[in-house]
Image (cartoon, rainbow, N blue to C red):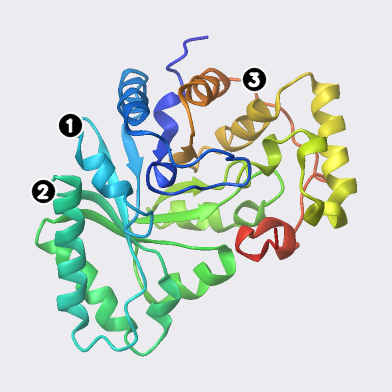
Amino acid sequence: MNILAHSHKLALGTAQFGLKYGLANMADKVPSDMVAQLLEIASACDITMLDTAIAYGDSEQVLGRYNLTKFEIVSKLPAVPSDCSNVEEWVLEQTIASLKRLKTDKLHDLLLHRPAQLLETNGEKIYKSILKLKEQGMVDQIGVSVYGPDELSELIKRFDFDVIQAPMNIFDRRMENTGMLKQLKKAGAAIHIRSAFLQGLLLMPSEKIPVYFAPWASLIKQYHQWLNQQGISPLQACLSYLNQHIDIDKIIVGVDNIWQMKQIIAAIDAPIADMPDFLQSVDEGLINPSRWQL
């Protein structure tokens, strides 16, 4: 099968370029010489989107050292400070600073990293401020990065977004089960999925999994048994689960090294595995990494 067949559906997450990130990442952030190689491989393999954020340490500065003309760049605004007296000015300043760090004159997508603020007092001002950036041509598309469909259902009642970033993986199928994927597609939004590997948990060998996950040991065991029966790797399973959803536009993957990058590109075209319904959970303690106590 052509290795490039589905790799265009991948987007490269760059949190690791600026921070130590992810459950399985034992190393510090990705060294800069490796960043250059990863960007080269991405470009050669038809991966055209880079996902970053102001909150990802110095990820934007790191990216700004390289020629990014072949890439569409997604960045995210952090929470607007509670004492902010001029929201529009703050949003504009943050975005200009972001563009300067990235050494680019335009973002493909600008997302709100804390979109719950849209439902608070300054919500309308925040939305109008990002909309203005789009009208001025500083960003092509605006959207939100959410924790799940509950938060999203409130937001889409009140605001229009071009792009939605949300978590989804074998264990966390809320975006699919609630009908949210279909609803967003119908509304014409682009859908970017993160947490494809649940911060690396779905790729870890059983014996390496932290004791925090003991309450879900039987689910994790069933998952590993199913992988063995199917004769597929965890990586193939995670990617093929997301790949079979035609409503998903991009699958954001973060990597720590070149070997991982090559493994992901090779695994993206794994034959579609039929996911058993019992391999999922709605338990926030498991599926929401911000709740993990490690």
Residue assigned mark 3: 271
Q: Is residue 117 above or below residue 211?
A: below
> In the rendering, at what x and y percent does residue 236 appear?
64, 26
Q: Nearer the viewer, residue 145 or 150?
A: 145
What element does badge 1 sit on? loop
Rounded to the nearest angstrom, the CA distance separating label 3 from label 2 is: 40 Å
Secondary structure type for disc 2: loop
Q: Which residue is mark 2?
A: 105
Q: Earlier in the sequence, mark 3 or mark 2?
A: 2
Quarter in which the C terminus is drawn: bottom right
Measured as percent of width and height from the top left, residue 63 is found at 26, 40
Give the label on residue 19, or none: none
Task: Decide if residue 134 is in sight here.
Answer: no
How far from the left and from the top, in percent, is residue 122? 31, 86
Say which residue label 1 marks: 67
Within 10 Å of the Cα at label 1, are there few (<14), some (14-19), or many (20+) other Cα atoms? few
Q: Residues within 10 Å of mark 3 (few under 14, many from 20)?
A: some
